[in-house]
Image (cartoon, grey):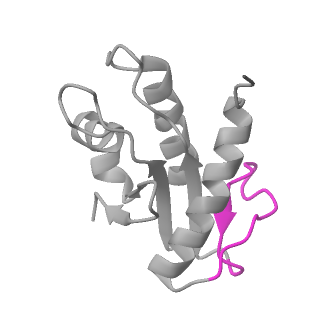
C-alpha cells in the first residue's frame, strides 16, 4: 500500500480549499506569483485577498504538534508582512483532537500569541467542503 506524501496531501487540500473558498468568498482565486518575496498559495487576481493553506493534523497520539504550530506561526508571519492585501486568510484543514474534540485550528486560535494583533482571518474547511470562520 502506497502512502500519499505530505506534499501531495497539501496540494490536494489546496485545490479543494480553492474551490471551497471561491464559493464562500464569491471571488476567483488563483496561484499567484510571489508577493513581497513569498509564494502564497492563493490570491484574488487583484491580490486584495491572500491565502495560505495548511493541511495539518493532530499527532496520532493526540499530543500538541509543536512543529506544525511553528509552521502556522510562520504562515501568520508571512501574511502579516503583506501590506497590500485587504484580507489575509489562513485556511486550515479541519482536524479534531481524538480526546478533547478541539480542532487544530481552534487550538491554534485559542493559544496563538500572534493572531489577536494580526487581523488575519482563520478559516477551517472540513472534508465535505464546509467552511467555518474562526476569527473576525
* Picture coordinates of residue 104, whole percent (x, y): 34, 37
As for residue 80 lying within the magenta part, the answer is: no
Could one spot residue 113 in this view of the protein?
A: no
* Picture coordinates of residue 19, whole percent (x, y): 60, 71
Q: Which residues are magenta?
A: 28-46
What count of labels does the image hold?
0
Quarter of the figure with the C terminus: bottom left
Q: Residue at x 31, y 51 (%)?
A: 117
Q: In the current view of this chain or complex, which residue is farthest to the front?
A: 1
Q: In the current view of this chain or complex, which residue is farthest to the bottom?
A: 26
Quarter of the figure with the N terminus: top right
- Considering only vertical position in the picture, is 114 above or below 1? below
Q: Is residue 52 left or right of residue 118?
A: right
* Picture coordinates of residue 109, whole percent (x, y): 28, 44
Q: Residue at x 28, y 30 (%)?
A: 97
Depth check: give the residue in front, 80 or 25: 25
Q: In the current view of this chain or complex, which residue is farthest to the left?
A: 100
Q: Is residue 101 left or right of residue 62?
A: left
- Considering only vertical position in the picture, is 50 above or below 90? below
Q: In the current view of this chain or complex, which residue is farthest to the right?
A: 33
Could one spot residue 69 in this view of the protein?
A: yes
As for residue 33 lying within the magenta part, the answer is: yes
Q: Residue at x 82, y 62 (%)?
A: 33
- Considering only vertical position in the picture, is 65 above or below 8? above
Prevalent SS, magenta region: loop
- Considering only vertical position in the picture, is 17 above or below 47? above
Amino acid at each position: 500500500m502506497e502512502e500519499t506524501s505530505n506534499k501531495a496531501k497539501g496540494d490536494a487540500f489546496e485545490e479543494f480549499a480553492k474551490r471551497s473558498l471561491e464559493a464562500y468568498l464569491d471571488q476567483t482565486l488563483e496561484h499567484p506569483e510571489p508577493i513581497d518575496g513569498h509564494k502564497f498559495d492563493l490570491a484574488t487576481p487583484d491580490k486584495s485577498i491572500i491565502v495560505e493553506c495548511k493541511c495539518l493534523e493532530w499527532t496520532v497520539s493526540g499530543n500538541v504538534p509543536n512543529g506544525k504550530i511553528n509552521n502556522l506561526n510562520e504562515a501568520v508571519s508571512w501574511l502579516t508582512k503583506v501590506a497590500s492585501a485587504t484580507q489575509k486568510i489562513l485556511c486550515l484543514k479541519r482536524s479534531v483532537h481524538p480526546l478533547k474534540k478541539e480542532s487544530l485550528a481552534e487550538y491554534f486560535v485559542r493559544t496563538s500569541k500572534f493572531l489577536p494583533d494580526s487581523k488575519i482571518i482563520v478559516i477551517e474547511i472540513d472534508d465535505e467542503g464546509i467552511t467555518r470562520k474562526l476569527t473576525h
